[in-house]
Amino acid sequence: MVPASFREFALHRAGRLDLEIEVEACEVVSARVSVRGQEDLVDAFEMACSLGPYDCIILDIERVTA
């Protein structure tokens, strides 16, 4: 994964979906983000990340509800 590319993608996509986002970690092997907002829009964000940018393949998503 290209950290800068994923970070830019995640921030942009969250903004388009009107979600609050915090990028907690973004490394070559993994990324951790927290998003808050309307549940169906969080679902859309998760789907977008699974499709992701071409240089950032997301293999696994763990979702934790607060």
Image: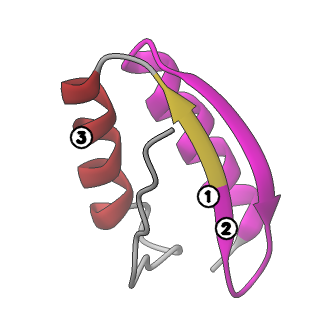
> In front: 24, or 57?
24
> In front: 17, or 36?
36
Residue 21 is a magenta residue: yes
Query: Which callout, 3 or 1, points to the residue nearer the camera?
Result: 3
CB atoms of marks 2 and 1 within 8 Å: yes
Q: Residue 39 is drawn in which quadrant?
A: top left
Q: Which residue is mark 3?
A: 43
Q: Few, some or many C-alpha atoms within 10 Å of disc 2 (few <14, some 14-19, many ≥20)?
A: some
* Picture coordinates of residue 29, whole percent (x, y): 69, 87
Q: Secondary structure at mark 1?
A: helix
Q: Which residue is mark 1?
A: 6
Amino acid type at image mark 2:
Ala
CB atoms of marks 3 and 2 within 8 Å: no
What span is in magenta? 3-32
**Marks 3 and 1, the one that precedes in the sequence:** 1
Instruction: Using the image, determine if residue 32 lies above or below residue 13.
Output: below
**Marks 2 and 1, the one that precedes in the sequence:** 1
**Marks 3 and 2, the one that precedes in the sequence:** 2
